[in-house]
Image: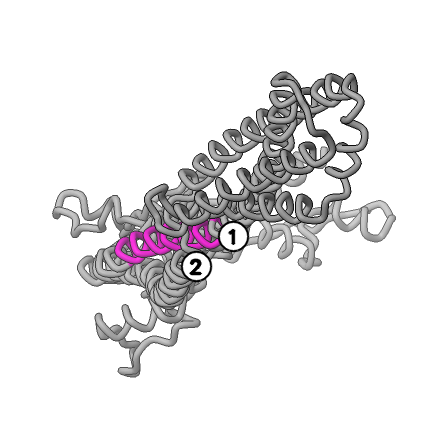
Amino acid sequence: MELLKLWKIICRRKWLCIQIVLVIVLVPLIGSFLVKPVYRYKAKVWIKYRDLQPQFLSWANSGFPADLGKLYYSTSDYLPDTFVALIESRQVSENVIKNLNLRDKKGNLYDISSFVEPSYIKKVFTQRTGVEAEQIEDSELFEIKAYSTDHETAVKIANGFAEEFLRLFYNLNRDAATMAKKTLENEVSRVKEDWDKAEEKRTAFRTAKIVVDIDKQKDDLLGELTSLRSKKTDTESKIEEDKGILTATEMALKKHPEFKLSQTSVEYNPLLKTYKSKLFDLELSLAEKLNKWKDAHPELKTIKSEIEFTKKAIKDEIGKTFSSETTARNSYYDTLIQKYGDAEIEIVSSRAKARSINSQIARIENELKDIIEKDLQYSRVSKNADNLKTLYSNLLSQLEVAKISEALSVSNASVIEKAAVALDASKKNYKYFPNKKLILIISIFLGIVTGLCAVLLLDYIDNTFRSTKDIADCLNRPVLVTIPKVLKADIINNG
């Protein structure tokens, strides 16, 4: 029943509803034909933000921070908003507005706050010119949308923002390259100075420490040390052998009764002790000087002559001592005395050689320690110089790359699709406003809704009685009689 009542109300005021629908539909529709269209053109920019750091700043081998010159805001969570903000930045907007001489109705250059991302009302009714940027879904592509009542102006705005953004982005990378170049120039100068000092220190160390070929020096000293140790072993064996001969000779001489008295005289003979001490010193001096001079040296010849003279003196003194204690001796006793004297002389000579060898061994061991210490010091100095040389070469190479990168247009952004003025046949595809179909659909919907609401509202506020039923319902009393409506024409016709 309610629906039927509602339908009766609509039918009763159908012309009002139709009029409202027609007004609401026709006014915007006619206006869409009369208003000057607003066109939208797009330019697409590709930003490779997965590798925003310039390649010349990869300094893993040179000890520099890897993020020098990196775009610090470039994190995956904020990248889209960051690049949209860069595209719509004041620097880009001001340059485009000034270059294209974009002015409002008052003749002033557009204000950036109203020109960038204008509201829908401004885009289609008041300002009717503007620009906005957005990311295309979850890609590295960004779309620059320009609005204007003129095709060419819209194209220029879109392309102008794209080009200015590329210039800004290039300047960011170029600034990073410039900063890197300045840093590298300072570092190259500093490292070159340190390298020169290290080379001077290495040269001074080689000169002061007489370092020519440390490995060869160590090999020579080790060879000489091995030879001396072998000589030491042979000398010690010779001493033991001579001691054995001396002991055997003493035992043989003990069989002769005159030996005991003679032995005492030999042991306490001060002259013989002097000769032995002199022979020891001469043998020691000879061993030391043989390391410095050749056999033909006059002083060596003199020492050898003194040694022979001293040996002969020792033998003679021993012979005199033994001969003074006996008047008659056999030849065997003389041979033993001779052998005894030779053994004494050999023992003294061997001990002198052993002492000289020990002295040489100690000297060579000290030299080896000194060489090893020199080698360690030289290695540290040389390693420092080599490291600085390598670092200098790397920095020099990086500096050249930075200079080239600063001169070139190195950028991670590029325009992959420029806006272009459409052909006459396709210009309607770039019309942003008015969209006649959309306006028609929306206006019909709004007209119907408004018409129905108006009809229902009028019926609600209308208190006119249109039937006896309305009176009975309102008064809650039955209707007793009705007076029919008599038209004036009926009265005239009935006389």
| Element marked by disc 1 | helix
| Image mark count | 2
The colour mode here is one colour
Residue receiving disc 2: 205
Q: Along the line of sight, which residue is nearer the eye, 414 or 403?
A: 403
- Taking the spot 30% from the left edge, 76% from the top edge, the residue there is 104
Q: Is residue 448 visible?
A: no
Residue receiving disc 1: 377
Mark 2 Cα shell of 10 Å, populated few (<14), some (14-19), many (≥20): some
Mark 1 Cα shell of 10 Å, populated few (<14), some (14-19), many (≥20): some
Asked if the stretch drawn in magenta spans residue 273, the answer is no
Q: Are marks 1 and 2 in contact (CB under 8 Å)?
A: yes
* Image position, residue 107 (x, y; %): 27, 82
Q: Along the line of sight, which residue is nearer the eye, 260 or 241?
A: 260
Per the model, the C-alpha gap separating discs 1 and 2 is: 9 Å
- Taking the spot 77% from the left edge, 47% from the top edge, the residue there is 481
| Magenta-drawn segment | 379-402
Q: Is residue 283 visible?
A: yes
Q: Along the line of sight, which residue is nearer the eye, 258 or 482?
A: 258
Residue 316 located left or right of residue 437: right
Residue 12 located left or right of residue 125: right
Q: Is residue 219 above or below residue 369?
A: above
* Image position, residue 103 (x, y; %): 27, 76
Q: Is residue 126 above or below residue 83?
A: below
- Taking the spot 80% from the left edge, 32% from the top edge, the residue there is 261
Q: Residue type at mark 2: give it.
A: Phe
Asked if the stretch drawn in magenta spans residue 389, the answer is yes
Residue 261 located left or right of residue 490: right
Residue at far right of view: 477
Q: Along the line of sight, which residue is nearer the eye, 305 or 257?
A: 257
